[in-house]
Image: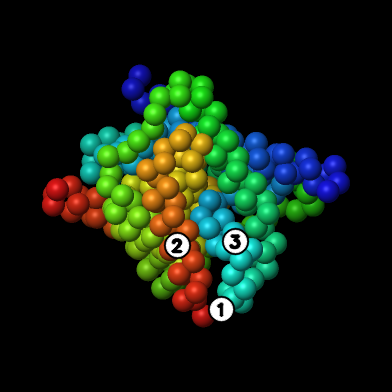
């Protein structure tokens, strides 16, 4: 690995640290908090999503206007989302699972660092679900 | 200010996603790592797509950062207090399965469609968020009602 690749890896790690620390501070790593939100007992997670989206919205809008390219790479990626049957069915199933366990992919990973071994059940379930989805996919 | 930690948490999550974009140009949704990591061991063409094999290394590093971030919170603000959940194991496993299957079929989760997709003003992501919020509200309330 050259210096650029190492810097990129370190920044990616640091971005993950901020993300994981943020999920923990926001208490999203506690399934009980998520389930309380989903049963209308505590609307705090709206604030988590709102402030997170706001920062990302500003960054995604401003960075490509102020910088010719990312600081450590040669182009800004775009990831267009599409609305089709898979997105609809996938999102609906994702919601059923999230409502059942109160854990989504980010918190399942971040919780590993907090020693919450109960959530390994959720992490294993997510990994298994992703495997089965790939095995059933046509492509 | 019982809600302040929600604000800080959201800002930190946004800062992480934003930092990744400014330095590397990458869109940092979280569910793809669960498909891209399978590409290390499963040879089926689906998992060997370039979008997984080209991104699997950085996605794994990003995920390692999440674990490290959780660890820093646990050793710091949480003071090493034991973390557990009262949600039954079967519910975590079965719920997790649908989370993984659904997020990958629908190409995104709470961070992919929620933070990144809505952050880039994409209507399909907004529809996806409204869809999973609806089924999640429904499922969680039915479960609480049954309990």
Residue closer to the observer: A113 or B142: A113
Above-or-below relation of A97 to A67: below
Is there one chain holding both mark 2 and mark 1? yes
- The numbered dot on residue A56 is none
Residue at 55 percent across and 39 percent down: it is: B67
Q: Which of the two marks, 3 or 1, is nearer to us in this view?
A: 3
Q: Nearer the viewer, residue B118 or B81?
A: B81
Q: Residue A4 at x, y = what percent?
A: 83, 44
Percent coordinates x, y for residue B69 in the rendering: 55, 34
What residue does disc 1 label? A139
* Quarter location, residue A58: top right
**Residue at the spot 23% in from the left edge and 44% down from the top edge:** A39
Looking at the rendered image, the quarter that the N terminus of chain B falls into is: top left
Mark 1 nearby-residue class (10 Å; few <14, some 14–19, many ≥20): few
Q: Is residue B125 left or right of residue A3?
A: left
User: Is there CB contact under 8 Å for labels 3 and 2?
Assistant: no
Q: Nearer the viewer, residue B8 or A110?
A: A110
Side (left or right) of A5 relative to B25:
right
The residue carrying pointer 3 sits among few (fewer than 14), some (14 to 19) or many (20 or more) residues within 10 Å by Cα, namely: many
Which residue position is annotated with label 3? B36
Q: Secondary structure at mark 1?
A: loop
Q: Is residue B70 above or below residue B122?
A: above
CA gap, disc 2 and disc 1: 19 Å
- N-terminal of the pair, mark 2 or mark 1, is 2
Mark 1 belongs to chain = A
Say the numbered circle drawn on residue A128: 2
Splitting the image into 4 quarters, where does residue A115 fall? top left
Left or right: residue B132 versus residue B40 is left
Q: Position of residue B135 (x, y in %)?
A: 29, 58
Label 3 to label 2: alpha-carbon separation:
13 Å
Q: Looking at the image, is mark 3 or mark 2 nearer the viewer?
A: 2
């Amino acid at each position: 690995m050259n210096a650029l690749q190492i810097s990129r890896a370190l920044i990616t790690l640091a971005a993950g640290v901020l993300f994981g620390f943020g999920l923990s501070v926001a208490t999203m790593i506690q399934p009980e908090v998520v389930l309380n939100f989903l049963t209308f007992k505590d609307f705090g997670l709206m604030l988590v999503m709102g402030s997170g989206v706001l920062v990302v919205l500003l960054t995604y809008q401003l960075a490509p206007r102020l910088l010719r390219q990312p600081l450590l790479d040669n182009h800004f990626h775009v990831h267009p989302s599409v609305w089709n049957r898979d997105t609809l069915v996938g999102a609906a199933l994702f919601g059923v699972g999230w409502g059942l366990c109160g854990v989504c992919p980010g918190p399942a990973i971040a919780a590993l660092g907090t020693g919450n071994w109960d959530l390994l059940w959720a992490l294993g379930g997510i990994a298994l679900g992703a495997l089965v989805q790939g095995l059933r996919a046509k492509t | 200010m019982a809600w302040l930690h929600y604000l800080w948490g959201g800002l930190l999550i946004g800062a992480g996603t934003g930092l990744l974009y400014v330095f590397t140009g990458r869109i940092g949704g979280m569910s793809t790592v669960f498909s891209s990591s399978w590409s290390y061991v499963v040879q089926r063409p689906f998992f060997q797509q370039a979008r997984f094999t080209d991104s699997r290394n950085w996605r794994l590093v990003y995920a390692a950062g999440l674990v490290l971030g959780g660890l820093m919170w646990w050793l710091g603000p949480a003071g090493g207090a034991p973390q557990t959940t009262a949600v039954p194991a079967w519910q975590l496993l079965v719920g997790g399965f649908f989370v993984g299957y659904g997020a990958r079929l629908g190409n995104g989760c709470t961070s992919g469609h929620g933070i990144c997709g809505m952050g880039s003003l994409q209507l399909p992501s907004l529809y996806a968020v409204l869809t999973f919020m609806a089924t999640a509200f429904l499922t969680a309330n039915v479960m609480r009602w049954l309990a």
